[in-house]
Amino acid sequence: MKDIDALVEFSVELADLSRSIIRSHSILDVNYEIKDDGSPVTPVDREIEKSLRDRIDARYPYHGILGEEFPSRDTTAERVWVIDPIDGTKQYATGIPVYGTLIGLAEEGQFVLGVMDFPATGDRWIGGRDYPTCWNSRPVTTAQCIDLCGATVAPGDPNRGSAEENFGSSKLADAGSFRVYGAGSYGFAMVASGKLDIAIDFGLDPFDFAAPVAIVEGAGGSATDWCGRPLTLESQGRTLFLGNPALLGTVVDLLQA
């Protein structure tokens, strides 16, 4: 992308805005309500997404927007911003500091740039197709584990998957060296940083995985569905993040068996 530097600068501007909003609210004063789909939402989620949408509309009015809390618009545009204002709302609402803002950019349906910002820990990842992934301005790369039996695996939450999904996730975790539960989107960032080899999940929407896809791929890893197909703006549900793309065939065969 010829304008990658401008897009990166704008993405950082959005992440800074989100971080400032989150930090302006005392965690002890945050209330939440339950949406129709059973997931929680706070007023801060909505404040962040509205602020980011307003900023995008002002800078790139011809870009589409897909967000978690408000209706999407122009998602068939060449470029679409994909926003999860607070990924980990349950953690945020209960004061557990592993939550963050995910900002992705899709170009013709492919995720080309992402920012994952975790204001409570001060961690920020940014990367994508034409921008090698960095953590707090430091370049990071994925681990190159060559044997599944030696892999560290972050499985999905067994409390929300189908029997088939839980079986597949558990089967993959059993094949590795050890598993780490509860990683959430932070686990995707740890794949990009070489601390985890595999993160598998299910029941996700594009706003959950747009930014992580770009960031993991920008660090040298792969991001697909459970059949090994690239994750796009049209994808739903099951995700598979690998530090070493060479493991993809082995992992997909295991999941499909």
Image (spheres, rainbow, N blue to C red):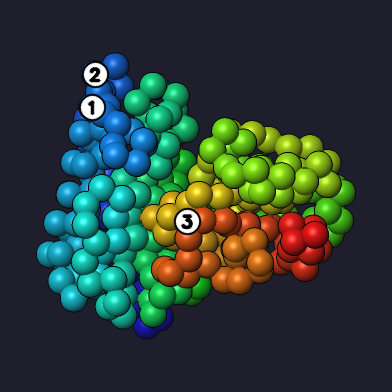
Q: Secondary structure at mark 1?
A: loop
Question: Do the residues under discs 2 and 1 have CB atoms within 8 angstroms?
Answer: yes
Quadrant of the image for the C terminus? Answer: bottom right
* Kind of element beneath mark 3: helix
**Distance between mark 2 and mark 1 Cα atoms:** 7 Å
Q: Earlier in the sequence, mark 3 or mark 2?
A: 2
- Residue type beneath disc 3: Phe
Find disc 1 in the rendering and name its residue.
25
Front-lying residue, 212 or 136: 212
Instruction: Rate crowding at label 3 as few (under 14), some (14 to 19) or many (20 or more) other CA atoms within 10 Å.
Output: many
Q: Is residue 70 left or right of residue 187?
A: left
> In the rendered view, does 43 fall on the left or right side of 95?
left
Quarter of the image containing the N terminus? Answer: bottom left
Residue shown at 27% from the left, 78% from the top: 77
The spot of residue 186 in percent (x, y) is 53, 42
The label on residue 209 is 3
The kind of residue tagged 1 is His
Quarter occupied by residue 242: bottom right
Crowdedness near tag 1: few (<14), some (14–19) or many (≥20) residues, C-alpha within 10 Å: few
Q: Which residue is mark 2?
A: 29
